[in-house]
Image: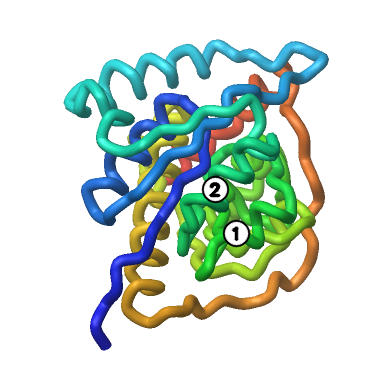
């Protein structure tokens, strides 16, 4: 079967690991446009932890050190406070994508889900059958559930993180995978799964998938104090990998 070129649009936010995702996926697959959501949810309590500052340094100064200076100049970029804004929805409709891939935005409306001709897909950093919502890798660590340090590509449904699963990938964690590096390890898995999905749809016109076996518990922002617990638990986990 001859592969066809499908119009692919990414929906994400402007963070260092999302820029890394855009850079690496763009090297593997043709991308047509980028939609950025500029507003982000904020917790009503303290969530910032020092390990996140170290993570930001690692991603910006080491991981993205050799990235093109103008990653977003390689394709059209549209920015909206919310992707559910009427203007954003109309712009997506006008572009007529075959595939939409969502990575790290807020919940999108049903109108957006129905726009792409082939698939509307979401990248979820975790196991949605157990952990839906936010900070899901951290919540798995908090519960000592290291076997569920996975990332998932699934179809988007109106209920958050409940769509049919296309791919799941266990994160390849070694003794050297500090908690500051964990988000980039997850992002690399997201690149791999997205490229497989785009190529699969281009060659076959569909993606095999499976229903989720259960609806996972929804988690929100993790407080700062619980993140400190996670840092300690994760360090002990890495020591056991010897």
Vertical order, 222 against 163 (above or below): above
> In x, y percent, where is residue 234?
55, 34
> In x, y percent, where is residue 31?
33, 50
**Residue assigned mark 1:** 115
**Residue assigned mark 2:** 92
Q: Residues within 10 Å of mark 2 (few under 14, many from 20)?
A: many
Q: Residues within 10 Å of mark 1 (few under 14, many from 20)?
A: many
* Location of residue 199 (image quadrant): bottom left
Q: Element at badge 2?
A: helix
- Tags 1 and 2 touching, CB below 8 Å: yes
Vertical order, 99 against 18 (above or below): below
Question: What color scheme is it?
Answer: rainbow
Vertical order, 148 against 200 (above or below): above
Please report the residue visible at 31 percent of the width from the left and 38 percent of the height from the top.
75
Distance of mark 1 from mark 2, alpha carbons? Answer: 7 Å
> In x, y percent, where is residue 10?
46, 46
Image quarter hosting the N terminus: bottom left
Q: Element at badge 1?
A: loop
> In x, y percent, where is residue 131?
71, 50
Could you say which is closer to the camera, residue 173 or residue 119?
A: 119
* Location of residue 111 (image quadrant): bottom right
Please report the residue visible at 38 percent of the width from the left and 82 percent of the height from the top.
204
Decide which of tag 1 and tag 2 comes sooner along the chain: 2
Image quarter hosting the C terminus: top left
User: Residue 211: in sight, yes or no?
Assistant: yes
Please report the residue visible at 24 percent of the width from the left and 54 percent of the height from the top.
28
């Amino acid at each position: 079967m001859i592969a066809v070129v499908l119009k692919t649009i990414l929906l994400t936010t402007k963070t260092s690991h999302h820029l890394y995702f855009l850079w690496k996926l763009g090297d593997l697959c043709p991308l047509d446009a980028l939609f950025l959501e500029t507003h982000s949810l904020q917790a009503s309590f303290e969530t910032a932890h020092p390990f996140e500052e170290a993570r930001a340094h690692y991603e910006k100064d080491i991981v993205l050190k050799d990235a093109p200076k103008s990653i977003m100049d390689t394709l059209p970029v549209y920015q909206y406070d919310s992707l559910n804004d009427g203007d954003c929805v109309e712009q997506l409709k006008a572009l007529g994508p075959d595939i939409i891939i969502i990575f790290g935005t807020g919940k999108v409306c049903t109108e957006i889900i129905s726009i792409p001709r082939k698939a509307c897909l979401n990248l979820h950093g975790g196991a949605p059958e157990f952990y839906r919502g936010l900070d899901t890798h951290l919540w798995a660590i908090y519960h000592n559930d290291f076997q569920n340090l996975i990332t998932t590509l699934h179809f988007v449904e109106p209920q958050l993180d409940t769509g049919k699963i296309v791919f799941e990938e266990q994160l390849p964690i070694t003794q050297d995978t500090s908690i500051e590096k964990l988000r980039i390890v997850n992002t690399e898995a997201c690149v791999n799964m997205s490229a497989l999905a785009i190529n699969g749809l281009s060659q076959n016109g569909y993606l095999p998938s499976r229903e989720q076996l259960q609806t996972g518990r929804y988690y929100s922002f993790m407080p700062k104090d619980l993140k400190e617990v996670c840092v300690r638990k994760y360090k002990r986990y890495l020591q056991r990998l010897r």
